[in-house]
Image (tube, rainbow, N blue to C red):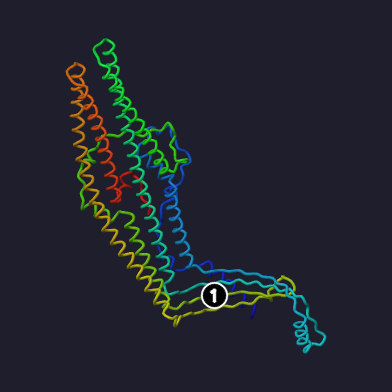
Amino acid sequence: MKNRAIWFAVPMLCWMVAQPSAGIARETVATGSSAKEQPGHATTIDWAAMSPLDLKTTVDIALTGNPGLEAAAARVRQAKAQVVQARATYWPRLDANASGARAELSENAYRQNLAAVRLLNPAATIEDPQDYYNADLTASWTLFDGFERKFSNASARYGEQSSAEALNDARRLLISAVALSYFSAQLALENIAIAEADEKFNRRQLADAQARRRVGTGALSDVLNFQVRKNQAKTTRINQEYRYEIALYGLAALLGLPGSRLPAHVQLARLSAETNAERSTPPVDELIANAMDHRPDIRQAQWRIKQTEAQVKIAQSDYYPTVLVAGRVDGERTGDPGFGRDDFGNRVQVGLAYNLFAGGYTRAKIREARQRKVELQKRLEELILSVASDIRSSVALVVTAQTQVTLQLENVDLVQRTRDLVEKEYNAGQGSLVRLNEAQKDLTTARSNLVLALVGLRQAWVALETRTGKILVTYGIPEVF
C-alpha cells in the first residue's frame, strides 16, 4: 500500500510541474520594442560619407551611441524581466533537496542511547559516528492568493509601459539637446563665414588703398584704417572658430563619441534658408491637445497611476485567504547514500491560510497605496498645467522669431545695397572713409543678426516640438511601446 502511494504521488508532481495556471491564458502582456530598436553603440560609422553632417544623421548617431539613452533602454529591459517574474508566479514550484551529514555523539549521549537500546536487546550496539542521508522532491502550487498574482502581473505590465515611455522621453530630450547644439554650432559656422567675408572686403580695400598711395592719390590713413579693419575681422573669425570648436565638442559628447571629438574632416552642413513650414503659425490649442495624448512624460505618469491602482489591489489581496496544494516525496537513510524504494515516503496536502488580525497592517498598506495614487494624480495635473504653459510660451517665441527673420532679411538687403553704393562712391572719390567703414560694419552686423534670427527660429521650433512631444515624429524616430 505504501509503494502504491509513492507511485501515485510522483506522476502527480510531474503533472503539476508541466501544467500552466489557467490564469495565464487570460493574461496579456504588452510587448516592448524589438532588439533592433534598442540603443547601442554603433560599431562602424562611415564618416567619409557624412561630411557635411546634416541634422538628421546627427540625431541618428546620437540615438545609437548616447550612454544616457542606453541606460534608459536598460531600464526597459529590466521592466520586461519583471513582467516575466510576475508571470512565473502562475506556475507550480518544484524543489529538490539532498543532504548528507556525519554525526558523532557526546560520551554522555552515547551512553544514554546505548542504555535505551539495550533495554530491548542487551546485545545491541550503536555505531558512532553515524552517517545520515536525506533526499526529497517537493512540488507546490498556489491555487488562490486573493488575486495578488493577477494584479502583480498588471502592475509589472504597467511598469514596463512606464519604462518604455521613459525611454521615449529620454529620446525626446536627447533629440532636442542634439538639435539645439547643432544649431549653435551652425551659428558659429555662419559667423565664421561672415567674418571671412568682412576680412576679404577689407583686404581688398587695403590693396586698393596701397595701390592709390603708391601712385600718390591715396592717404596713409586709409591704408592704416583698412589694416585695422582687416585685423578686427580676423580676430572675430578666430573667436568664432573657437566657439565652433567648443560647440563641436559638446555635440560629440551628446553623440557618445569616444573622447567627445568628431573626426577632423567632418564639417556641419551650412545653415539653409527658412522653409514655408517654419513660417507657418502654430495652432496653439491643437498642439496642447496633441501634447496631452502624445507627450511621453505625460503618458509615463498615466501608466504609473495605473500601476499604483494595481498596487492598491495587491494590498487588498491580504483580505482574502491563500490556498496551496503541495506534494512531497522524501527519503532518509543511514550508513550510505544507496537509496532504495523502501527508503522513500510521500505526502500530499492542501493548505489554507487566512490572516485574522495583523494590527491594522493591511489597512495601512492599502491607505499608503491609495495616497501614492493621489500624489501621482496631482503631479500629473501639475505637469499638464506646466506643459500647456510651456507650449503657449514656445508658440509666442516662434511667432516672434518669424517676425525677426522677416525684418532681418529686409535689413540685409537694404544694408547690402547701401554698402555697395557707398563703396562705389568711395572708390570714385565722392564718399568718405568713415561712411564706408560704417556701411561695412552695418552689413556685417545685419548678416550676423540674420543668422542669429534664423537659428533662433529653428531653435524655437525645436523647443515647441519638444514640448508638444512631436519631435520624435519630426525626425522620423519610431517610438518604443
| SS type, badge 1 | strand
Spot occupied by residue 320 in the image (x, y as percentages of width and height) = 42, 78
Residue at the top extreme, as displayed: 215
Which one is nearer the viewer's eye here, 471 or 140? 471
Spot occupied by residue 449 in the image (x, y as percentages of width and height) = 25, 35
Tell me: residue 305, above or below residue 434.
below
Q: Picture quarter containing residue 430?
A: top left
- Image check: 151 left or right of 119? left
Residue in the picture at 23% in, 45% down: 398
In the rendered image, the quadrant that contains the C terminus is bottom left
Which one is nearer the viewer's eye here, 111 or 405? 405
Spot occupied by residue 248 in the image (x, y as percentages of width and height) = 39, 38
Which one is nearer the viewer's eye here, 258 or 54? 258
Tell me: residue 332, above or below residue 73.
below
Residue at the bottom extreme, as displayed: 119
Q: Which residue position holds label 1?
A: 326
Q: Picture quarter containing residue 368?
A: bottom left
Spot occupied by residue 241 in the image (x, y as percentages of width and height) = 37, 33
Q: How many marks?
A: 1
Which one is nearer the viewer's eye here, 278 or 191? 191
Badge 1: residue crowd in 10 Å (few <14, some 14–19, many ≥20): some
Q: Picture quarter containing residue 440?
A: top left
- Image check: 104 left or right of 38? right
Q: Amino acid at mark 1?
A: Ala
Residue at the right extreme, as displayed: 123
Tell me: residue 322, above or below residue 192.
below
In the rendered image, the quadrant that contains the N terminus is bottom right
